[in-house]
Every structure is written in structure tokens, then in C-alpha cells.
Amino acid sequence: MDYREKFEMALEKVQKAPRYTGGEMNTTVKAWDETPLHFGFCFPDTYEVGMSHLGLKILYGLINRESWSLCERFFMPWTDMIELMQKEEIPLLSMESRRPLNEFDVIGFTLQYEMSYSNILAMMEMGGVPLEGTERGEKDPIVVAGGPCAFNPEPLAPFIDAFMIGDGEDVMTELNRVILRRKTEGWTREECLRELAKLEGVYVPSLYDVTYEEDGRIRAVTPNCPEAPATVKKRVVVDLNNTYYPEEIPVPYTEVIFDRIMLEIMRGCTRGCRFCQAGMLYRPVRERSLEKLTDLAEKLQEATGYEEISLSSLSSGDYTCLPELIRTLMRNMKEKRVSISLPSLRIDSVLKESLEETQQVRKTSLTFAPEAGTQRMRDVINKGVTEEDLLEKVRDAFSGGWNSVKLYFMDGLPTETEADLDGIADLARKVVGEYFAVPKDQRARGLRVTVSVSIFVPKPFTPFQWAPQDTIETVFAKTEHLKKVLNIKGVTFNWHEPYVSFMEACFARGDRRMGRVLQKAYEKGCILDGWNETFRFDKWMEAFKECGLDPAFYANREREKDEIFPWDHIDSGISKSFLWRENEKALRAETTRDCRKGCNGCGLQKWKGVCGYANAGSV
């Protein structure tokens, strides 16, 4: 019995077999022998998470539209399937053709979350791919990675051959062409990696040496060959209208986290929230046109049959033509009973008309992110909204028939005090009050206010990259305080355990030595670390100890102004001097204007023609 037959038999014994069956509507299966380049797209988490990710759908379609390349998907199996695969000696197989991972020419991981890193090692080992780049031979795949976490590639440097930094649509095709040349022209791995390093936006870690100070801080990151640039500049797709976007997407047989059409209306954000990595990394703002979006919505709905379209962006309320877009989509989709949802709403965006339009089919829960409970704290993080902004929007929602509101906050932000925590409860209480201020016969029944408080994690390329994370003990104390003050009728309080966030901070700001910790923890059985039921904090702490590293050095240590960061050789387009100025302004609780109201000198001005706000006034 071969491994494919064993795999089919295993499907009868596992939970949620549709995670593994493949064959979904709109998937692509190409003739293996007739397609020169084989790309294995690896999402280092479960199928339900991976199939909710828009980037996977974009790159899957992008690679498969080229006649010379095919893309097949791999996901991280759950524990019951892993156990069966090990017992029956079944390798990690692709969803489309059931081929092992090591048969592909190139395998690519998307790095969306630091706590999926152990899954990367697990997937490679299950797929027969040597974990470390130095162990791979000429017949092994080239291992690449991209996504937001690739902006600090160093913790994964021992395991990834090349990182794609920034937008992936253009660089993906260029990278695949180089790897195809390796295959057709007989290049060695070393020759291929040096060619990849010549591509803008591609970082090849083996071509750089890292030295350290005696106290553990980085002294320098230095190229060790002429092909490697001193700094690697991120890739930016300038024109979203003319870049690739799928007109049909795979439709899962089983329920996934975001089971709907995701319509990316814009990329980037001008707001400048100081904790937000995505808001910095995805600058500048680029919008898709109204005509392009309505056309895509029609084609995607027809191809999938989905009954919900989510308008995807970092701040959907800032899209220039939002009311007109929603009116058009509602007019086109109303007869099909397709609803429009608005995630990532800015509290101060012009939303009333848009909300009235979207409620015509069905009401979904509204989500707002004040992030902090007091105005002082919102000024520290440059949120740019007021309490009245929130209450006005909530008032509009309750008057318009909504009864469910989710509010997102963070604790552990720089300069936070107990009064700032109490402010979260005060704000929740006022939101409840707005509901009861609507006449009883005009409001929807069954108020649900959910307050979710996550733990601040300082991230690279943000003004708070110098800040320490709260210790675990401090987080527990703050959570207990919030439990008391948020004991409010009609309010549900959700909080996070600090252990996972602590590890997230270690990897977010980690250097290459974190790769040793990662491998040691994986050897101890750490996988699926983003899931509470499988996360093993004790094993991670053992791994740190055995590697002679202190996790507090990464998570809880405040950085000096001129300290060299592990990611300083990556150019995000945002200057370090700008981020430091923003850090200083945060400590004074001073705000910075929205880029749409005038350029703040973030550094994108040097990227000529890319930032539409570079000349919109002076700093």
C-alpha cells in the first residue's frame, strides 16, 4: 500500500476530514509533467485558518495563471492527523495532487503570526525537507517565505533560504523565474541564492554575517558576497487596479474562519497608530477603483456563491468612495441576498450612511477598536479618535437596529496607568448607556457588548519598537483589575493569557539566536503554538535555558535610541529617525496628523511616485 492509499484510509479516522480532502470548487490541478516549475504554498496553520487568508488566494491564482508554473497547497495538520501520519509513515502531501513537499522545486511559507514558526519546522520535517538551509542538497527545494513577519526575518534565518519583503505579486513571479532557470540551466543552490539576492525585495540570510556585542546586542549585520545589498528594500505594488487579483477562489467544503468573499478595497493606512505594525509596513495607501471593485465583486460572487462580501483593508472607513461603493454593491447584490460587511472600522469615519445601506440584507456585529480607555492613552498611541467619536457611531448603530457591538482594547501600552484601565470600563458603561437611550420600541432586543483586551506586543518598524512589554506578572495583575471593573450588566469581557503574547514578543524582536530556541523547542514537541490546547510554555522556557538565552532580553527590555535592531538591514520605507520622533511624541502624549492632511516625513518621500501624500504639505 502506497502513502496515498494510507492517507485516504487515515481520513476515516480523523476529526474534520474535509480539512485534508482537497478537490474544492475553483481549485487548480495542472499536469505535473507538463508544467516546468512546481511551487508548494505552505500555510503554517490549520486549513480553517489558511483558507481564510486572502494572500494565499491571491498568490495561488497568480502562480497558477502562468503556463510554466503550478501552485499546490499545504496546511499544518491537527494533532490527530499528525499522529496517524507518523504511525503510517505518510509524508505531508499537497491538497491538489497528493505529492510530498520535497518533490516541489520551491516551497513558500507565509509568515502571518510569530507563533506559527514551530509549524514551519514541523511541515518541513513531515515533508522530507531538511530543516536548516546548510543541510539541504542540490535536489532539495528552495525554501522561501514572505508576509508581515518577514520584515524581521532573523529568527527564521537558519531555516529559510530567501525571504520576500513587501508586496508579493510582482516579486513572486520574478523569484519563480530565477528558480526555474536554476532547474533548466543546472545552477547550484549557491548560484541560485546569489541570483535571488539580486532581486529587489529578496533577502537571502546565508549571504549575511551577524556579529554581537558582549552584552548580547547586535554589533553589525554585514553582507558576505557582492550580490547581497547592504539593505534590502521592500517591494511595493503601485497600481492595485492593474495588479493581479483572483476572479474566482477555492471554496472550502467545511466551515472556515472567514467563510466569505474578501474584497481588498485598499492597501495601506495614513493614520499612523504607533502600535500598529501593519499601518507602517503597508504604507503608502493605494486604492482600487469603484469600477474595478464592483466588477470583481460580481465575478467572485458568481464563481463562489458566497452570501457575504467583506470589504477588506486596514481601515475600510477611509476608502474614498465607501458610501458609493456600498450603494452600488447593495444594488447589485440585494436580489441575491448577499450581505456586505465592514470590518476594520475607524470610529471617526463617515459611516452612518454606509451602515444604513449594509443593514438591508442582514445585520452583522459591528466592531470598533478604541484601543485605549482614556483620551490621554489614545493620544499616546496616536489613535486620533475621541470618546464622542465612538459614542456617536454606537448611537447611530443602535438607532439603526444593531444590538451587538465588539470593542477592542490593549493593555500594557507604554505609559499606561490604572486610570487608563478604569477608562476601558467607563467607556463600556457609556456604550451600554447609548443602547438604553434609544426608545424601547425602536431598539433591537438583546444587547451584546463584548470587550476584548489583548496584550501589547512591541513590533519592529513601529514607534514602540524600543518599548518593553509588560512582564507576565504585571499582565496578570492588570487582568484581575479589569475583571473587577468590567463586571457590568450587558458586557462580556474577553482577555488573553500572557504566555503566548510573551513568546510572540520574543520572536517579533528576536535575532538569529532565536532560531536555536525555536529548533530546541520543536525538538521538545512544541507545535501549533497559536492554539491554547497545544501551547507548552514550560517547554519554551526549557529551550531558552538550554540555549543559554534569557527571554526577558527580547520581550521585557527597553531598547536604547541608537541600538542596532536585528531588522535594521531591511528597508520598510519608513525611516528609523521618524519612528524615534514618534516614540518621543508618544511619551509626551502628542499626536501626529493623518498623512491625508499633510506629509509627516516618514521616509516614503524618497520613493518617488509611490506615496500620494508625500507633497501634501510640510512636516
Image (tube, grey):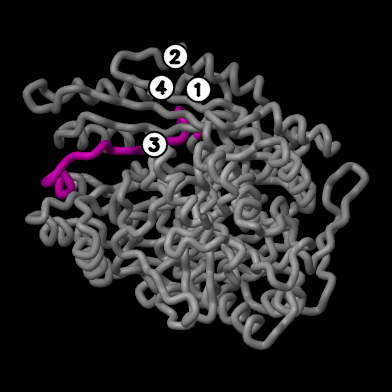
Residue in the image at 35% along x and 27% along y: 450
Q: Position of residue 279 (x, y in %)?
A: 50, 53
Say whether disc 3 or disc 4 marks the residue closer to the N-terminus.
3
Q: Residue type at mark 2?
A: Val
Specify the quadrant that holds the C terminus. Answer: bottom right
Give the Cα separation between the discs numbered 3 and 1.
16 Å
As drawn, 541 above or below 274: above
Is residue 133 visible to the viewer in this orientation of the structure? Answer: yes
Examine the image and state in which quarter residue 12 appears: top left
Q: Residues within 10 Å of mark 3 (few under 14, many from 20)?
A: some
Q: Position of residue 504 (x, y in %)?
A: 62, 39
Circle 4 sits on which residue?
Answer: 493
Q: Residue type at mark 3?
A: Thr
Say whether disc 3 or disc 2 marks the residue closer to the N-terminus.
3
Mark 2 touches mark 1? (CB < 8 Å): yes
Q: Nearer the viewer, mark 1 or mark 4?
A: 4
Q: Which residues are magenta?
A: 356-377
Circle 1 sits on which residue?
Answer: 421
Q: Residue type at mark 1?
A: Leu
Q: Which mark is residue 386?
A: 3
Say whether disc 3 or disc 1 marks the residue closer to the N-terminus.
3
Please indicate whether residue 550 sits to the left or right of residue 299 in the image.
Answer: right
Say whether disc 2 or disc 1 marks the residue closer to the N-terminus.
1
As drawn, 357 above or below 292: above
Please indicate whether residue 315 sits to the left or right of residue 36 in the image.
Answer: left
Mark 1 touches mark 4? (CB < 8 Å): no
Residue in the image at 39% along x and 70% along y: 29
**Secondary structure of residue under mark 4:** strand
Q: Position of residue 383 (x, y in %)?
A: 46, 42
Circle 2 sits on which residue?
Answer: 485
Give the Cα separation between the discs numbered 2 and 4.
10 Å
